[in-house]
Amino acid sequence: MTRQECFYPGTSLRKGGGTMVRRMMIWCFVLSGIMATMPGSVLSADAVTGPKQYWQKATEYAGNKLYLDAVEYYTRAIRTNKGEIPMEDVAQIFVSRGMAFLSLNDQDR
């Protein structure tokens, strides 16, 4: 008798008794998917946010002297831009991000 059969009689994985484990894993994946798409979750909020919203949020953070958050959101705006923001404005985002870096007094980044 194997160790697993001691705990769960008749459920050896070798004999095909792993259906309970598979069902548990499937339910975990389903529930995690539901939790990820619920309103207010981080994943669903980021999926709707575009580069213009990131840019506006970064400008708010910079105005409140939260420079580390501003740098993060300026970077997100640059990375997620797929043509929604014209190149002239992208250049302004780069300049604003550089100013936020200088305000951090960490010029090595």
Image: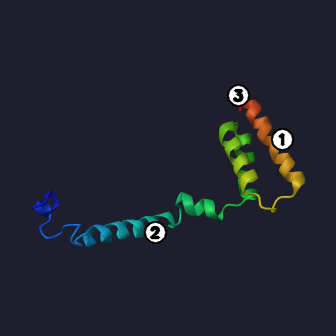
Identify the image quadrant of residue 51. bottom right
Quadrant of the drawing holding the C terminus: top right
Identity of the amino acid at label 2? Answer: Ile
Whether residue 10 sits left or right of residue 100 in the image: it is left
Residue 50 placement (x, y as % from top left): 71, 61
Q: Which residue is mark 2?
A: 34
Residue 75 placement (x, y as % from top left): 72, 47
Identity of the amino acid at label 1? Answer: Val
For label 1, the SS is: helix
CA gap, disc 3 and disc 1: 16 Å
Residue 99 sits above or below residue 31 on the image? above
Disc sitting over residue 106 in the figure: 3
Whether residue 86 sits left or right of residue 60 in the image: it is right
Of pointers 3 and 2, the one earlier in the residue sequence: 2
For label 2, the SS is: helix
Report the number of numbered marks: 3
Q: Which of the pair 28/64 is nearer the observer?
A: 28
Q: Which of the pair 28/15 is nearer the observer?
A: 15
Q: Which residue is mark 1?
A: 95
Of pointers 3 and 1, the one earlier in the residue sequence: 1
Residue 82 placement (x, y as % from top left): 77, 61
Identify the image quadrant of residue 6. bottom left
CA gap, disc 1 and disc 2: 39 Å
Residue 32 placement (x, y as % from top left): 43, 64
